[in-house]
Amino acid sequence: MATSKSTASAAPKARRPAPLALVKNDAWLAPYEPVLRQRQARLQARLAEIEQYHGSLANYATAHQQLGLNHDAGRRGWVYCEWAPGADYLSLVGDFNGWDRGANPLQKLDFGVWEVFLPDAEYDQRLAHGSRYKVHVVTAAGGKDRLPATVRRVVQDEHTKDYAAQVWEPATPFTWSDQKFKPTKAGKEPLIYEAHVGMATEEGRVGTYREFAENILPRIAAGGYNTVQLMAVMEHPYYGSFGYHVSNLFAASSRFGTPEDLKFLINEAHGLGIAVLLDIVHSHAVKNEAEGLADFDGSGNLYFHQGERGNHPGWDSKLFDYGRPEVQQFLLSNLRFWLEEYHFDGFRFDGVTSMLYHHHGEGVAFMSYDNYFGPAADEDAILYLQLATTLAHELKKGSMLIAEDMSGLPGLCRPIKEGGIGFDFRLAMGIPDYWIKLLKHTPDENWPLSDLWHTLTNRRAGEKTIAYAESHDQALVGDKTLLHWLIDASIYTHMHAADGDPIAARGVALHKLIRLLTLAAGGEGYLTFIGNEFGHPEWVDFPREGNDWSYHFARRQWSLGDNPELKFHQLGEFDKAMIHLAKAQHLLAAGPAVLLKHDEENKVLVFERAGLVFVVNFHVEKSLTDYRFWVTEEGKYRVVLSSDNGRFGGFDRPDEGYEYETFEHQLSLYLPSRVALVLELGS
């Protein structure tokens, strides 16, 4: 029977969801929106699963409280647990039982977890603060003494060089006094001082957490930096790895002192208003079996991928299996541990590019969006990173998360609800590479200012970046610091303040311009590497066989920066003035720099940011009189910073007391060669 029009009804059309915010901001992402939504859905499904079985993501991130050696007051004894489903036998050994591998065997429980209980009545005096221990693991390949996966302190025997776990239960726990410190302020305008505790002394030796707290933190505070990023804190057997071949993810390196010493450092930093970031390495781990996690239970893929997929092609290290729930839990617990146990304020995630892609970024040029969302993307790693950023922001309000990524993945530093990964900042890795490339290959009279400006300002809208002219990567042996590239041998012979050497004068002038331009236009955060703020003269080279195990280059020569008779001191003074100006004007919290004039012939860039006008003359010899350019606002302008000030190693050419008044929206300046002026509109 036919149906009349009055009773017929068409099937309702399914409404298309509104585009993700990430796609709204970048129409080129529209074809990849299904991938972004699939990532969101996978995260939500995983969170729902975690909440079903564990109550919350925070509760899930407690592997360090369940595994390893922990004292249980209720049971009145020590409980040692280890996840090793493929092992045949485990026993706890140490000086408490004469290293007898048969004295304290573990019992295998569910889910591949092994356990042994040592009652206080028997072990109270034997298993005490300072005791050394290991776990003996027997597999089909034989037995080996290993370090527990979640060990919190590892010490090296001075004579045998063997590493062992150490019970750390001091009679008096550390007392924190940083309850009022909040990292939120630093996170809005991060001025980051990247540092390595061990190389922070002038003497050729390994520095300590306490020395860093007492001697270096005051320098950082005086310099105006509000954040310190600590490298090489996670325990690593080879000092020369710069801390990037981590063996024990939950252990603060004992070569720099005790856990209380590290807590003292962080507590002192907070007292100075300085946030502290941990340079965390979840992208790979050391392949050593004696010190690390490799082949822990004999299965070949407990924490790491099986076979060749578990080996990084360029780093000679092991790669985590992010798709395995136990590995997710292990790494998430690691984040919670550092935030809670040591009061870190966030993380700089190392090697994120390697995590994001199956090819690890090796030999790949990211020229198309297909590179980000195609089969090369490691969806397990992306899910882990989304879980990690969710957890860190949930556990500590205002925590700062920085991604070291050179691929430029869209959305990496946008909220997950918008289709992103959830980081707060990415490192602007192209900027230091560009500066070094210019210094190596292009005479400064030929520097292409259009390319330079593009490099400094080419970043994704809405995704914050940390700009830097050089980091530890540019300071390592085999390369040179910026000042070393600029001055070369003169860095050793012509750095007295009264020395008129033209090579040194050029280098000092350009060093100031490079750093000011990077800070002012390059990002929403800024980073320098320890000592480079005053142009430290030498590269970094840790003790190794090739240099006869010398500490000569694994130190910082603070006396050079402190000596007012040297150009190093003048560079340091300029850095202080530059950083304090950025803080006072909230430069990094302002919108992006706006180019007012690009003058290729005269090698001048003029731009505006945060109400300041920056005028930079890169010309090698031409000083410009009556140099005119347009400004947004009319009025009287005064110089608030001149790189040519005598205090900064300049020649005091522009009169810094002079007021420049606009005429028909134009300013006219005297602009010497290789000089930067920063002007502010008067009230």
Image: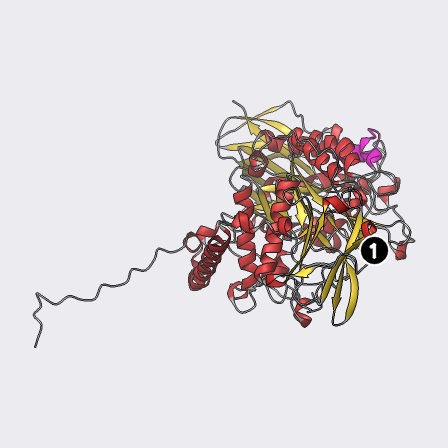
Q: Which residue is mark 1?
A: 99
Would you place residue 249 above or below residue 344 in this image? Answer: below
Task: Give x and y (percent) for residue 301.
Answer: 66, 67
Quarter of the image with the N terminus in it: bottom left
Q: Is residue 649 visible?
A: no
Direction from residue 291 to residue 415 in the image, left or right: left
Q: Point out the residue furthest to the front here.
A: 121
Please provide the residue range marked out in magenta. 558-572
* Rendered image quadrant of residue 268: top right
Nearer to the camera, 522 or 628: 522
What amino acid type should be assigned to the residue bearing mark 1? Answer: Trp
Please name the colour scheme applied to the rendered image. Answer: secondary structure
Nearer to the camera, 148 or 464: 148
The secondary structure that dominates the magenta segment is: helix
Q: Point out the residue furthest to the bottom here.
A: 1
Within 10 Å of disc 1 (Cα), the crowding (few <14, some 14-19, many 20+) is some
Residue 504 lies within the magenta run: no
Q: Residue at x 83, y 38 (%)?
A: 201
* Rendered image quadrant of residue 599: top right
Would you place residue 475 above or below residue 257 in this image? Answer: below
Direction from residue 357 to residue 665 in the image, left or right: left
* Rendered image quadrant of residue 636: top right
Q: Residue at x 68, y 72 (%)?
A: 307
Q: How many marks?
A: 1
Nearer to the camera, 651 or 602: 651
Task: Give x and y (percent) for residue 188.
Answer: 55, 37
Would you place residue 311 above or below residue 507 in this image? Answer: below
